[in-house]
Image: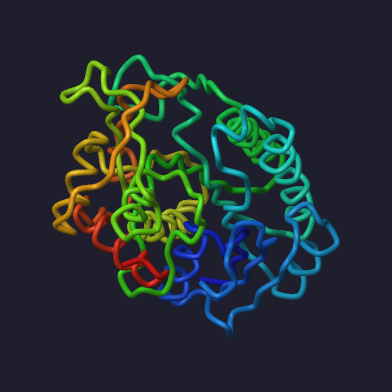
Amino acid sequence: MSTVLITGGAGYIGSHAVYAFLDAGCDVVVIDDLSTGVRSNLPETIAFYEGDVGDRELVGRIARDHRIEGVLHFAGSVVVPESVTNPIKYYRNNTSRSLEMIDTLTSCGVQYVLFSSTAAVYGIPERVPVTEETPLKPINPYGWSKLFFEQQLRDVGAAQALIYGILRYFNVAGADPKGRTGQSTPQATHLIKVACQTATGQRDGMSVFGTDYGTRDGTCVRDFIHVSDLAEAHVAVYKLLRSAGKSCTFNCGNGKGYSVREVIRTVEEATGSPLQLTYEGRRAGDPPELIADPSLLLKSMPWRPRYSLADMVESALEWERKQGGQ
């Protein structure tokens, strides 16, 4: 493969993608404004630019100087509750600046775009598992900001020689099994991250939101995918874009659902200690159950997820211990 630009490459998923593409023998360039990303999670030798993806001069210079063939676009804001209280930030970061970036890159001859989207574009689906044909009904500005950019990609792809891939993530968890990178945002809201921080003494306790859902144990059910599996899926989809020469959209998940209680129990079993829990009411907008149907992705390429929920928890625990946890 030729050289790829990874935006938000110092962030959680982006940094794992950097290592996956390097491991696959690809040349990688990273741009990140370091608002949430951590430079030390990347190799010192990598070509790294601190900056904004909406900076047309910088992005254009990177594309020309490094002869960028394709871009993996991870940069953006990702906290759902914050998107409700500060929607302008989300539409600016996830939609407006992303459009500026695509306009710049296509003018520089970049051929491929692989976009980090989200299952939030489905809102609260009427049926699970969720396929790519499930109606798109976001219920918060975060989901809308991602869906708007999906549409922009489709329109630009129809008008220009741009081939794109849209990957809709479900719940991403775990850390690099080699210990090179992990979820480094202290105030992250990911369930497994929070549970592992609690287990390693970095939090006094954690909240469980809602115990009265119509699920098998009353708590929300989610589809978790190991971040390294997800990063390797990006490599596989990028290869597909180059070989097939056509755009695609895929759900990225395991196709299995685990409840909040089951995740907590897995963390407790891994550490041998109970977590300090506080039970609270439901959070507005939380679907009772959200599980991917990843069959289209599985049919399209040889990629398969390798890691179990226990693997996700163990790698996340190891990362938290490395960050100073007990």
Based on the displayed image, in which of its 4 quarters is residue 220 positioned?
top left
Q: How many marks?
A: 0
Side of 76 relative to 116 (left or right): right
Q: Residue furthest bottom?
A: 45
Q: How is the image coloured?
A: rainbow
- Please tell me whether residue 322 is drawn above or below residue 100 in the rendered image: below
Residue under the image location 21 percent in, 21 percent down: 215
The percent position of residue 131, horizontal first and vertical second, equals 35, 28
Q: Name the one closer to the observer, 117 or 298.
A: 117
- Please tell me whether residue 44 is drawn above or below residue 246 in the rendered image: below
The percent position of residue 119, horizontal first and vertical second, equals 44, 34
Q: Name the one closer to the observer, 161 or 153.
A: 153
Based on the displayed image, in which of its 4 quarters is residue 132 positioned?
top left
Q: Quadrant of the C terminus?
A: bottom left
The percent position of residue 234, horizontal first and vertical second, equals 44, 56
Q: Name the one closer to the observer, 265 or 253.
A: 265
- Please tell me whether residue 135 is drawn above or below residue 209 in the rendered image: above
Side of 58 relative to 287 (left or right): right
Residue under the image location 62 percent in, 71 percent down: 29
Side of 310 relative to 322 (left or right): left
The percent position of residue 125, horizontal first and vertical second, equals 38, 19
- Please tell me whether residue 132 is drawn above or below residue 29 in the rendered image: above
Side of 41 relative to 29 (left or right): left
Residue under the image location 30 percent in, 32 percent down: 291
Q: Residue furthest right?
A: 57
